[in-house]
Amino acid sequence: MTDPHPHPVQAPGVPAARDRLDRALDGLAAAFRGAAARPDENACACHWGSAEELGLLKTPGGDLDRDLLQRAWYGTDWRDPGAVLRRILPQFARELTTGLDGYAWAVDRAGAAFAEAGWQEWPARQSGAVREFLHAWWAYALRVTGPGLLPAREVLTVCTEASGAIGPWLAVWEGTRHPVADHHLAETLDAWDWDLLREELPWRPWAAWPEEAEGAVGAVGAVRTELTAWIAEHAPARLHAAGAPSPCATQPASWASPPPPATKTPTGPPTSPNPTRPPPLRGAGPGAAPRPLQPRRRLRRGARGSAPATAPHGTRRPARAAPAPAGPPRDGPATPPPAHPAAPPTPAPARTAGPG
């Protein structure tokens, strides 16, 4: 069983952060005591579970089996997802803080479970308890690391999708200055750098965020832009001071700036001063007109027996034909050769004398 208080690597302020998290968990238990799913809640017996298991969600109090708990918060077709989350939230929150045990693979749906439940519209006591839990969990996650705990980037993902914003969580990370928080930052960049360089969100957004319309930046694009700008501003100095490898400490600075123009060198093809970005395609920059397609060169047909004037690329040119016989003198009249050589005349059959 996973230790509920693992501190293999600790930072200053861990006891205070742990006390705050414990109080937040107690607050969830008090705020949602007696909560249950709706009596008419339904689920597919083939894909979700039996009627007896569904009845446990409709009965307040008591912890659920971990497998049933995972199916409850991972489900997407509840009639009232808010009532289901209120029923399981005290136990679900405890499982999150201890790494979800054998169900960490499903953490990518955890933040969406909060968002789909609409917890920010709940009564003040309940919504305040959820908000305090998320902030206490994030503050604690930045100060500890070790086996059995979710990585800080996973906690950031859950908190971002649950709240619909990433700025408040990045502000806490910025104000948490110690080696463990910097260690989490280095691990996050190592896991997310390729997605950010491709200008993609480094996790699959399950939350019901608006799609990006053409010519506009949607919620996903806004979160990605804010995250990239924060990393470019704060990560290099922190990782350099922490002794992180030089690629992690210098690469983020290029994420918030466009690629520099390619420069030609006398000994090779165009190269870009920025090694993290390939040189832009010629004529493919912003505002550049597309290069017109070059028409194919038509093959000219020469005289019979001669090679075409232009051979297709990659094909062997046929051997030259034998030179034509000498024609009339240069100063004589030019007589075009016949298109086809004349056939010799056919001799007429000899006449035979008839009888008499």
Image (tube, helix red, strand yellow):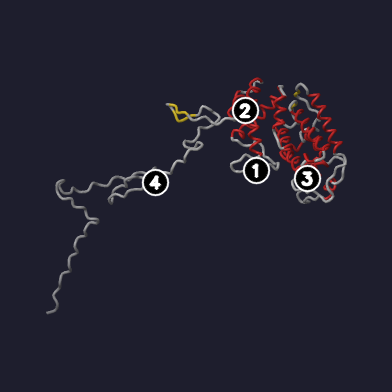
Q: Which residue is mark 3?
A: 81
- Evaluate if marks 4 and 1 touch, with contact meaning CB atoms under 8 Å apart: no
Circle 1 crowding by C-alpha within 10 Å: few under 14, some 14–19, many from 20: few
Q: Earlier in the sequence, mark 3 or mark 2?
A: 3
Q: Earlier in the sequence, mark 4 or mark 3?
A: 3
Q: Residue furthest left?
A: 356
In space, the residues marked 4 and 3 are separated at their CA atoms by: 62 Å
Q: Earlier in the sequence, mark 4 or mark 1?
A: 1
In space, the residues marked 3 and 2 are separated at their CA atoms by: 37 Å
Q: Is residue 287 left or right of residue 241?
A: left
Quadrant hosting residue 131: top right
Q: Secondary structure at mark 3?
A: helix
Q: Nearer the viewer, mark 4 or mark 2?
A: 2
In the image shown, does 306 or 30 lie closer to the viewer? 30
Give residue 275's position: percent from left, percent from top.
54, 28
Circle 3 crowding by C-alpha within 10 Å: few under 14, some 14–19, many from 20: many
* Residue 339 visible in this rendered orientation of the protein: yes
Q: Could you tell me which residue is drawn at 75 percent across and 25 percent down? A: 143
Q: Which residue is mark 1?
A: 211
Say what amino acid the circle numbered 4 marks. Answer: Arg
